[in-house]
Image (cartoon, rainbow, N blue to C red):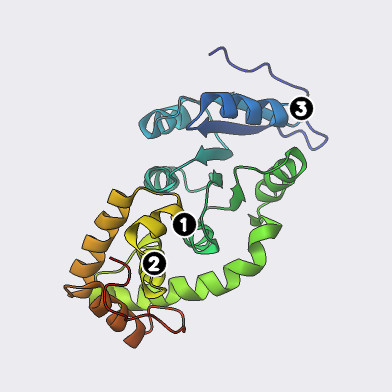
Amino acid sequence: MAPPDRRSVASDGELRQILIADDYPLLARGIAAVLASRADLEVAVCDPLTTRVLACSTDRPIDLVVIGAADWRPWLEMWNTLHARLPGIRAIMLIEFDSALEAAELAQAGVSGVLPRSVGEADLILAVETVLSGREFVSSALSGLMMDALSQVGRQRVLGSTFGGLSGREVEVLELVAEGLSNRDIGLRLHISENTVKNHMRRIHYKLGVTSRTEAVAKGSRVGLLRSRAWSSRPGAGR
């Protein structure tokens, strides 16, 4: 792709460099088109591969990387590598999140902005302006919910030294098991496959040192991993 045209510099004389990457190249180009309307931003689109984004970031000085991802976890690993290499760089992630807990995990990892992929143009531009000014930005739809989610992340971290640390997604799955949902229903709720749910359950059992769903919920509830709620232990529930 040809390098973007250089635009007139903002009043403070600074042209900010933005790198865009998205699982869907068409969406990446749409994001770039929105941001390129700003005279103080120079925007480039990178191939949607984590290794390629790392390479792109060394080809030019980058102030901000905007990442759109259906599954943000591989991108988070890339972000950790990129942030370690370029401590001054900042990131905004547009994600298909299923809960505020996921957004809270990204915030904990040092991502400066978290928005849903359905974000509108005005909110996207506001997020970029906010993050480039050195502040954090969280979608208004998430900000209130994240307070509770951050406390959940805190509980998860405390338990990490004892149980090996359940991921945010594993905590979500366990909470839905506590509600009595089957693997199929959990998959529908979280928009993941039933096989993925089963994989999460195998890891949960291993990390908690249990052999059944009922034991996993009981142990998670006992040590404070789950939010306080009544949970079903009826025979056969959630299988």
User: In this view, which residue lies farthest toward the front?
Assistant: 235
Callout 2 secondary element: loop
The disc placed on residue 37 is 3
Q: Secondary structure at mark 1?
A: helix
* Quarter of the figure that contains the C terminus: bottom left
Whether label 2 touches label 1, CB < 8 Å: yes
Reading the chain from its start, which is encountered first: label 1 or label 3? 3
Query: Identity of the amino acid at label 1?
Result: Arg
Q: Which mark is residue 181?
A: 2
Farthest top residue in view: 2
Residue 42: percent from the left, percent from the top? 66, 27
Q: Nearer the viewer, residue 167 or 154?
A: 167
Cα–Cα span, label 1 and label 3: 38 Å
In the drawing, what numbered circle is on residue 122? none
Q: Position of residue 222 (x, y in %)?
A: 33, 87
Q: Closer to the N terminus: mark 2 or mark 1?
A: 2
Image quarter of residue 34: top right
Q: Is residue 88 left or right of residue 124?
A: left
| Residue 94, picture quadrant | top right
